Image (cartoon, helix red, strand yellow):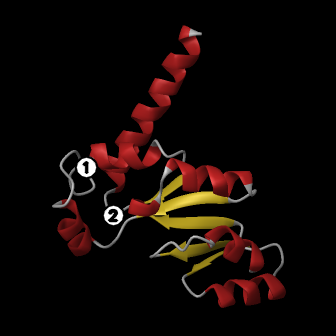
Amino acid sequence: AQFASFNHERIAEVKYLAPDAITGALWADLPDDFLERCLQVQADEVHFRYDTCTHNNVEAAHNAGLNTMAWFRGPKAMGTDAIKYHDVGNEDVNMYKTVLQSGVMSLCANRPSIALEAVLEQVARCISDDEDE
């Protein structure tokens, strides 16, 4: 079973009741001590809001043994967010590529077909890089 919540105390409760359950700590506003908080409730994953999903945050989570996911706000909020960026659009392929470059392991997206396109492009690039070595 998998359980994710913004209420991290509930994650601890789920782990108590079902220690093998996979749990994810969702974050809207990412505090500086997010890793400590995730580990305290025994979360297995960190679920970053897309705009907090940086290479440094993802790398820190992976180094702490946590899996990672980036989630995107609802379509209306994403439309509002997108106007503050000049190099990516509202969950367009460039936005997904940018988030994937952080090293995040999975995405929770409102536009899955476009997200898949970005993932496939990243996989193709990795294969090409391996062949060049």
Instruction: Using residue 120 as the reference point, say whether residue 7 is left or right of it.
Output: right
Q: Which residue is mark 2?
A: 110
Amino acid at pointer 1:
Asp
Mark 1–mark 2 contact, CB under 8 Å? no
Q: Residues within 10 Å of mark 2 (few under 14, many from 20)?
A: some
Q: Nearer the viewer, residue 56 or 50?
A: 56
Residue occupying image coordinates x 55% and y 67%: 47
Q: Which residue is mark 1?
A: 92
Residue occupying image coordinates x 44% and y 41%: 119
Task: Residue 46: give its label.
Answer: none
Q: Nearer the viewer, residue 10 or 117?
A: 10
**Residue 38 on image: x %, y %:** 68, 73
Amino acid at pointer 2:
Asn
Q: Residues within 10 Å of mark 1 (few under 14, many from 20)?
A: some
Q: Quadrant of the C terminus?
A: top right
State whether residue 11 appears in this view: yes
Q: Secondary structure at mark 2?
A: loop
Quadrant for residue 44, please give it. bottom right
Q: Earlier in the sequence, mark 1 or mark 2?
A: 1
Residue occupying image coordinates x 19% and y 66%: 79
Instruction: Using residue 27 as the reference point, say whether residue 23 is left or right of it.
Output: right
Q: Secondary structure at mark 1?
A: loop
Q: Is residue 18 above or below residue 92?
A: below
Q: Is residue 9 above or below residue 111?
A: below
**Residue 5 on image: x %, y %:** 57, 81
- Residue occupying the far top of the picture: 132
Q: Quadrant of the N terminus?
A: bottom right
Q: Nearer the viewer, residue 120 or 42?
A: 42
Q: Is residue 3 above or below residue 120?
A: below
